[in-house]
Image (tube, rainbow, N blue to C red):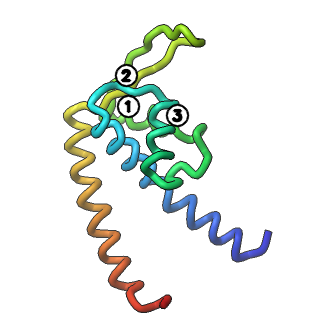
Amino acid sequence: MGDDEVYLKKFQKELSAGTVSLAMLAVLAKAGEPLYGYLIAKELERVGEGVLSGKQSALYPVLRNLEGAGLLESHVEPSMAGPPRRYYRINERGRQVLEQWTQAWRATRDSVDSVLEGVLQ
């Protein structure tokens, strides 16, 4: 792997740290019902155009962190198709944080887009 690829991977990892949390909160807010990890991952793949980039295992630590921060609530339900499933739902505090993070994301995106405008054409 060349230096350029190493730097690209590092940049992508740094970018994804916050964006995955933001995207998960958004998916849960839109869902309107509790979802378990696999369904969250599938929805992120469907609408997120690679926000997880094939790393579904990274989803669970982020969900636990969001729950630990008081932004999500969860409960476990038995499953007919295997082990019990943990379902997550966004709570009111999570909705407030999602709104703040969305505003921060858009401001950052717009600022970076302004700087990048005209660089690559």
| Mark sitting earlier along the chain (1/2) | 1
Q: Quadrant of residue 29?
A: top left
Per the image, the residue denoted by label 2 is: 74
Residue at 36%, 78% in the rendered image: 113
Q: Is 107 on the left or on the right of 43, as rendered?
A: left
Does residue 19 appear left or right of residue 25 in this picture? right
Residue that badge 3 annotates: 60
Rounded to the nearest angstrom, the CA distance separating label 3 from label 1 is 11 Å
Q: Position of residue 37 (x, y in %)?
A: 49, 30
User: Disc 1 to disc 2, how far (Cα)?
Assistant: 8 Å
Image quarter in which the N terminus is found: bottom right
Q: Is residue 18 visible?
A: yes
Q: Position of residue 41 (x, y in %)?
A: 50, 38
Label 2 with label 3: CB-CB less than 8 Å: no
Instruction: Find numbered disc 3 in the image and state the secondary structure of the residue it sits on.
Output: helix
- Find residue 67 and name its label: 1
Q: Image quarter for residue 92?
A: top left
Residue 36 in the image: above or below residue 53? above
Tell which tag, 1 or 2, sits nearer the viewer: 2
Name above or below for residue 35 compared with residue 15. Answer: above
For label 2, the SS is strand
